[in-house]
Image (cartoon, grey):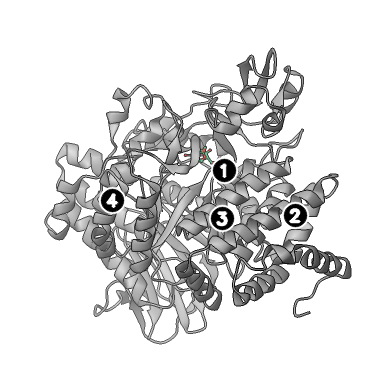
Amino acid sequence: NIFCMAPEVREAFEHVKEVESHRLEGRLDPRDIDVFWLRFERYFDDLYYSLTAIYGEREDALVCFGALFGRMVEAYSQRPVALKLLDLERQFTPQWFQRSHMVGYACYSDLFAETLLGVRDKLPYLEELGVTYLHLMPLQEPRPGANDGGYAVKDYRKVRPDLGTLVDLIALADDLRGRGISLCLDLVLNHVAREHAWALQAQAGEERYLNYFHTFPDRLLPDEYERTLPEIFPEEAPGNFTWVPGMGGEGRWVWTTFNTFQWDLNYTNPEVFLEIVELMFFLANLGVDVLRLDAAPFLWKRMGTNCQNQPEVFQLIQAFRASMRIVAPGVIFKAEAIVPPDALVRYLGVKSTVGKQCELAYNNQRMVQLWSALATGRTTLFTYVMHRSPQLLIGCAPINYLRNHDDIGWAMTDEDLQAVGETPYLHRRFLNDFYSGRFAGSFARGALFQINPHTGDARVTGSTASLAGLELALEQGDDGAIDLAIARILLLHGLILGAGGIPLLHMGDELGLLNDTSFLEDPLRAADSRWLNRPRMDWDRALRRHDRRTVEGRIFQGLSHQIRTRKATTLLHGFSLLQPLWTGNEHVLGYSRKRPEGTVLVFANFTSGAQAIAAEMTRWGGLNGEVVNLLTPGRPVPIDQGTLRLATYEVMWLTSV
Ligand code: OTU
């Protein structure tokens, strides 16, 4: 009895062990069986509590549990030896994903290198940049026609034929592992394409598969739910339900949060849980290191709510995670939950559930605040929300990013905006106007996404470079404006690379790729302006990356320098407390990150002019003795007569020697 369990849980554990032991005998060697039971015992209560909370009342609860056990044994016995070794290694180094050498890169395989084999050929390019974490956008077989950038999956066990085969994917995963690059893949677990086998069988009226989805014979319940449900894609897919004629007789309304062709799964049905956990095992055994749980907040529906972040979502994640810890403990979860900070931290675990939820989550908050501060030149709101945001717990990390394949939604609460003297509506309106280039004097070239006529809300799309002013500057042929745009790009990157967690670059940002408007000519994509920031890799421009006289060279080399600097310090490694600072100058952001071996103090000037703060700020930020800027080694920090000076859009990573 090495692990504490409440008596009734221990009893359940002993019972399972007694009745299920035979399933392992003869299939695995005795040492592997021991390891299995050890992990099973360790994670048993996580499984027990979560599954009984969700499915405990059902008559078939025990049958379901038995089925889960069977799938775990099956997957464990098929786990390749190399991956079992990795599992062991990562159990020794539980903070493996928080090392400061971790630098992420997200891309579409086809847009980056045509095929999975092509991606393998381009790995030296990623290594040159210092990438150690590669997120390949959905690559499983999608439905034909519009497929939401691959997020409408028809077959989770097949690779998109134009990208290659499952064999290619395994080879790529092996290759990445050999180079020390972790592979992240999406698991689209909130919905499937309406062409997925489960959905087809439901459409054919098969009872078993009807229960895989939320369907309704009339508008009674859908209307009731709609009262409190937001719309995710109000322009192309208004509402949350889709009428499917002929389904189960006359026809039925199906729950479709996103597009009409993406059918939400019904997790009140334990068979759905079992299907998805099996897919997790499948991906894990291919050699995937990180599973991105797409649209995690939406997994559970509850009348009278917005049907996001419901308590059962966290029970489900806990059960998924415990199952994975038993079968493939080297694999971690990344929550894709674009939700307010108080809700977000729950995906990483809060005090009583730390270590039971995801290890990683997108830090949407930082992304939004970076763009907001860049447009206004002011950092008060950023500092205020940093102060208000809950601290993360040991064992989990944010993914810090500037842009991804989605839009930027201005997720800021009215309360926070009012607290710093902003009018919520006007501030969001300003950001939309600014980044869509409508605001007089704006340097940005983006587009609006999903304008909601009822609420007036809208989000923004565009590439980092275009939003930061490079597109306009190049068009005007204005060298001064080009310099400023590059300085903004490096400032923003300096604030995701000069932070804890995992910085995640979006393909093309390392070269300053601009908006790609070619989607407008493709009828399947034209209505979705998120394609603006899903450009094809420009390998001709990449050739200029070593030439510092070119825009590409200046950005690539600037980023490479930040990346190398990050990797060379242990101060950005692992877990630490983040302490925001009021710098006394509203244009200069400040925060520190303390570790036992020292402190990194970051200052960032969000304006195109020089700025000054009191040199004393370095002491308040926790630095003593001589101060150095890790980004400009060998050069003295510009402190003069009690004042620290920051150049145009400068970011400093200070520490003491
Ligand atoms: C995700 O995004 C994906 O990133 C999108 O590319 C998909 O279209 C979508 O899921 C459906 O699969 O609303 O605007 O809180 O914000 O799941 C993008 C999470 C989205 C949601 C997120 C969703």
Q: Position of residue 492 (x, y in %)?
A: 36, 55
Of the two numbered discs 2 and 1 on the same chain, state the one appearing first in sequence: 2
Front residue (pair 301, 595): 301
Residue furthest front as drawn? 26
Q: Which mark is residue 66?
A: 2
Q: Position of residue 454 (x, y in %)?
A: 58, 22
Of the two numbered discs 3 and 2 on the same chain, state the one appearing first in sequence: 2
Q: CA distance from mark 3 to mark 2?
A: 17 Å
* Amino acid of disc 2: Gly
Q: CA distance from mark 2 to mark 1?
A: 28 Å
> Callout 2: few (<14), some (14-19), or many (20+) C-alpha neighbours within 10 Å?
some
Element type where label 1 sits in the image: loop
Q: CA distance from mark 4 to mark 3?
A: 24 Å
Of the two numbered discs 4 and 3 on the same chain, state the one appearing first in sequence: 4
Q: Is mark 1 within 8 Å of ligand 1?
A: yes
Q: CA distance from mark 3 to mark 1?
A: 19 Å
Q: Nearer the viewer, mark 3 or mark 2?
A: 2
Residue that badge 3 annotates: 281
* Amino acid of disc 4: Leu
* Amino acid of disc 3: Phe
Element type where label 4 sits in the image: helix
Q: Quadrant of residue 559?
A: bottom left
Q: Quadrant of residue 302?
A: top right
Up-down relation of residue 278 to residue 133 (above or below): above
CB within 8 Å, label 2 to label 4: no
Element type where label 3 sits in the image: helix
Q: Is mark 3 within 8 Å of ligand 1?
A: no
Q: Which mark is residue 295?
A: 1
